[in-house]
Image (spheres, helix red, strand yellow):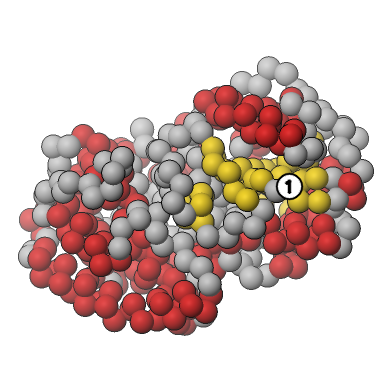
Amino acid sequence: MVLVRDMPAVGRGFIERLEPPDIKNFYWTKPSPKNSRKVAVISTAAVSKRGDRPFSWLARDHRVIGKNDRDLVMTHVAVEYDRTAWQLDINTILPLDRLDEMAKDNEIGSVAEKHYTFMGAADPRDMEKSALEVSSEMKKEAVDTVFLVPV
Amino acid sequence: MCGLAHIFESQGFSTVLVGFVKEHIEIIKPPRALWLNFPMGRPLGKPNNPEFQKKVIRTAFDLLEKSSGPVLDDFSEVIPVREGRMSYALPVSLVYKVNQLGNIDKLAEQVQMELSNLLPDYFKALQNVGRTTVGASELEISEFVPFISEFAKGNKPKSPRKGLPAIPLLKLVVEDLNAVYTETRIYKDKIDDFEMLGKWFWEETHAGKLLLAVEAVSLESKDQVLRQIASMSLLTPRFWSEGPLPGISGSGWT
């Protein structure tokens, strides 16, 4: 995305007024060796499996996407981003096929069975409880690497 | 997204993110971030281009080799956008007043006819592509226009979907209708051009005109939620417009 100063007036004004979260502590987890990493994707595109509960407009919760789930719908509150890209190719927002190919090529260790989506419009401070639940699930699966993808 | 990175890192995961708003990444300082100068809605860059998508992932994952952070790199390739906007935006001048709308029943008939003409290609696309993004509303396609038209006439229909009130459902139906049109056009004309698709849908189709009618009515509605979602451009794409809706500061985002 271009720098905020180069955006048109309405979007620029909104983004400039967003209050970033105040991060008190900085954590750094040493990554696993490249070809043993188990990767899970966290997306804020508010996509979910067809038939799942839609995300509410400022949802703090999350949905689970299975490694092989491709029949997804999006219930993101915002309309300010292009939705034609994911209509063309789901990997443009949720690159599970690409990660699978990279695992087969030994570029990463493996792809997690479960991936997680949030509503990107919500304040990240409100998502902490849900993020901790996701962390617990990822630990059960021995995920060690998290790839965060916005929309 | 940057805030989530800190939470997951604190839980013992190594995180890496790709992100769009560089200024926010610089302030929030997630452990490892790759800034993308791409339009929003396409964080892996180019649809149906596995090599480009893997280049984004590989570049992001290279940050996992750094011994300390926070680290922020720029992805080397830019996907240019028009006039700084991250997606299609309606022209500021294209706003209807309620007294300009004319006969909504007639407009709804035109949309139904237009939709009927598109559907054979939509179903061909579905068969050939094997997936559709239409369906968040869980309404049948045949129900879209009657449901939306009620709002354009100033009514608030009962939600046919249990557990989801009419106004949140309206938003999903609007997006489903839009997706039927764009998926059909993408398939039929082999297009990857969100500016062109946005201009076509919102400025040239009867469906776009019906949704602008809903916006006009909603902006004058006594229903606060309906008024709010219209003024915040949650029904129509005005976020990247050069100016706000008339009479509304910052497109309602203040």
Q: Locate residue B154, reporting x and y percent.
A: 11, 49
Judge whether B25 appears above or below A6 on screen.
above
Q: Locate residue B116, reporting x and y percent.
A: 27, 78
Using residue A13 as the reference point, say whether residue B37 is left or right of it.
Answer: right
Q: Residue lying furthest top in this view?
A: A24
**Residue A69 seen in this snapshot:** yes
**Residue B32 seen in this snapshot:** no
Mark 1 neighbour class, 10 Å CA radius: few under 14, some 14 to 19, many 20 or more = many
Q: Residue at x 59, y 48 (%)?
A: A65
| Viewer-nearest residue: B81 or B30 | B30
Q: Quadrant of the N terminus of chain B?
A: top right
| Viewer-nearest residue: B227 or B111 | B111
Query: What residue does disc 1 label?
Result: A112
Callout 1: residue from which chain? A
Q: Locate residue A42, reporting x and y percent.
A: 64, 43
Q: Residue at x 38, y 68 (%)?
A: B180
| Element under disc 1 | loop
Q: Quadrant of residue A106?
A: bottom right
Q: Locate residue B111, reporting x and y percent.
A: 22, 71
Using residue A148 as the reference point, say whether residue A78 is left or right of it.
Answer: left
Q: Residue at x 83, y 30 (%)?
A: A29
Q: Quadrant of the C terminus of chain B?
A: top left
